[in-house]
Image (cartoon, rainbow, N blue to C red):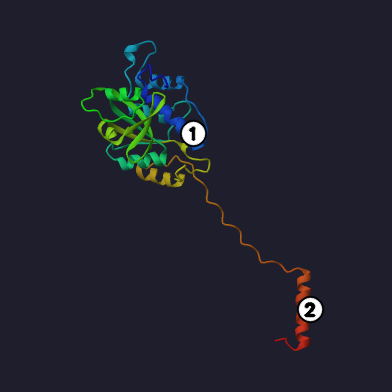
Amino acid sequence: MSLNDSLGDCTAAGAGHVAQQINWYGQHQDAPVADSDVLAMYEAISGYQPGNASTDVGATLQDALKYWHTTGVGGNKIAAYAQIKATDLATIRACISLFGAVYTGMNFPASAMDQFNSGKPWTVVSRSRIEGGHCVPIGAYDASSFTCVTWGKTQKLSVDFFERYFDEVWTVLDLDWLTAQGVSPAAIDGAALNANYEALTGQPGPFPTVAPSPAPAPTPAPVPSDADAALVAAFKAWEAAKGFAA
């Protein structure tokens, strides 16, 4: 839950969920993010004061991303982030595939809570009132749906639902998505990421790179042994004796 059952801290909870996912799939490490880390992030980005319900007002995704980039949540920082058009489904799917997840904001309809509580996918229900904003990370997709993480569970949602209610999408680049060899699970190498990052921002890329493997040393020609030399000399003498020598 990351406290999101009692606080409006979905932006911080969502960051914690992404961090755990990236560590698991990128580094094969179970790296939980403590509730205290999520709370510290939420306090910093929203002004929330524990015990004062009037300060529990939520936070913007952009403020959460800035904190996540500069301070981190539970020891996990992102190296870069970029906004994607919420209508660009092809790029959204590509970013999920290449970088592990997208971090999203939505207008949450009342029908979605009923569907969540019933264990059903989120689908469009006409004339359902909007309860407020909600942040969820999306880490999987297929042709007709996406899968997000929220309130301690994975939750499927139809593409129609996404197109109706989601209006903010960010890709986040976490170095823990790269293996120790500098290659992501989708085989994107650090050198290529750095080149693209520098082209976009004018700043050096933050990603580790892998030094090219040195070319193998040429194999030297075998040196004839003494026995080989003696055999060759004997064969030449035999040729000469038989009149075969050139």
Q: Which residue is drawn at 52% across and 51% down?
A: 212
From the viewer's side, name the closer residue of 166 and 215. 166
Image coords of residue 3 (percent x, y) = 41, 19
Asked which quadrant contains residue 55, the reply is: top left
Q: Name the residue under label 1.
A: 24
Marks 1 and 2, Cα distance to the nearest angstrom?
Answer: 69 Å
Q: Residue furthest left?
A: 127
The N terminus: image quadrant? top left
Packing grade of label 2 (10 A; few <14, some 14-19, many >=20) is few
Image coords of residue 50 (percent x, y) = 39, 13
Amino acid beneath label 2:
Ala
Q: Which residue is drawn at 37% across and 21% down?
A: 9
Packing grade of label 1 (10 A; few <14, some 14-19, many >=20) is some
Rendered view: 23 above or below 224: above
Asked which quadrant contains residue 133, the reply is: top left
Please indicate, yes or no, whether residue 70 appears anywhere in the rendered image. no
Q: Residue 42 carries which label?
A: none
Please indicate, yes or no, whether residue 33 appears anywhere in the rendered image. yes
Amino acid beneath label 1:
Trp
Image coords of residue 54 (percent x, y) = 32, 12
The C terminus: image quadrant? bottom right
Q: Which residue is drawn at 30% across and 25% down?
A: 112
Q: Name the residue under label 2.
A: 234
Asked which quadrant contains residue 138, the reply is: top left
Count the numbered circles shown.
Answer: 2
In the image, taking residue 210 as reference, residue 171 lies left or right, namely left
From the viewer's side, name the closer residue of 238 and 162. 162
Q: Which residue lies furthest to the bottom in this view?
A: 243
Q: Is mark 2 on a helix, strand or loop?
A: helix
- Sequence-first disc among 1 and 2: 1
Q: What element carries label 1?
A: helix
